Image (tube, grey):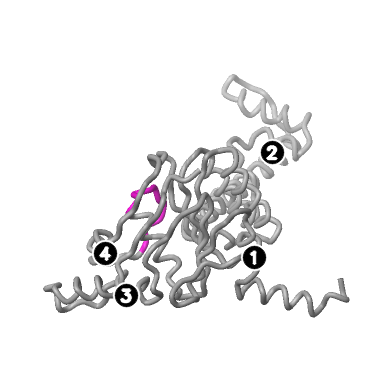
Amino acid sequence: MIYVDYFTFPDSEVEWDFLYKEKRTCYDSVYPFKVISKHGFERIDFEPITILYGGNGSGKSTVLNVIAEKLQVQRDSIFNKTNFYPNYLNLCSVVIKERLPHDSRIITSDDVFDYMLNIRNLNQGIDMKREELFEEYLDAKYSKFKFRSMEDYEQLKKVTNARKLTQSRYIRENLIDNIREYSNGESAFKYFTEKMQCEGVYILDEPENSLSPIRQLELKQFIEESVRFFRCQFIISTHSPFLLALQGAKIYDLDENPVDLKKWTELENVRTYYEFFRSYEKEF
């Protein structure tokens, strides 16, 4: 499914004309001006899966944030932007083929990190509650409790349960709203699958961060199935060989000047992995 057909950025001449006429003379940064144009990147034509590839400083994240802001999709985390951002967006243009679904969003590494941090904090609270229940269980199981009035009824229930249940069963039954403890990779993958459940345009900034190779392959399959069965469109920045191999992906190499289209097997990052493992082929 293609919702966003193509997107254009101002070239260096348009940027220069704007900045020359700009009356503000004291400013620390004109970001995002001069970031995308230095690569000669003026237009993206989208497919159901479009990938931006390039090293640090190539402008991948800037491109994604500009597109996300122009499309006005949802986002969870704030990002750095200067007073020049609205001016720059006005110089960009986008052509939409189909109306963007409501659930369209951008997902950044900060979003995933904040989610994992929240899960960790919840689990730390659960761990403290477990310790309290462990002590409660031991006190109840081995106490010399005597029922004297209805005020002791709640304690009687605890003693009765402790004496008939194992420690793990007692804790499990009394730990309400338990949060499963996920690893960072599991939490990151869970975040993606929760946020990308419906049709929409999903902009992913280096989603491989915090994901093991196996999880990256699972995300690859999830994205391919989302495009095939759930009318999703993806715009992704990545270094991951696994995600660069996404079926049918159109890849822009931002390390080239001007930006060029490449097959995933032609990209430097992928070739480096290939040559490395090839040199150790006899050991496999």
The residue that label 2 is drawn on is 171
User: Camera-side residue: 275 or 182?
Assistant: 275
Q: Residue at x 30, y 56 (%)?
A: 93
> Distance of mark 3 from mark 1, alpha carbons?
29 Å
**Mark 1 and mark 2 residues within 8 Å of each other at the beta carbon:** no
> Distance of mark 1 from mark 2, alpha carbons?
44 Å
Q: Residue at x 38, y 54 (%)?
A: 68
Say which label, 3 or 1, has the lower sequence index: 3
The three-letter code of the residue at mark 4 reads Tyr
Q: Position of residue 265 (x, y in %)?
A: 65, 68
Q: Please give left or right for residue 219 compared with residue 77 in the image.
A: right
Q: Residue at x 51, y 72 (%)?
A: 54
Residue reaching furthest left?
A: 23
The residue that label 3 is drawn on is 34
Residue 67 picture quarter: bottom left
**Residue 128 visible from this viewpoint:** no
Q: Nearer the viewer, mark 2 or mark 4?
A: 4
The residue that label 1 is drawn on is 241
Q: Quadrant of the C terminus?
A: bottom right
Q: Which residues are magenta?
A: 70-79
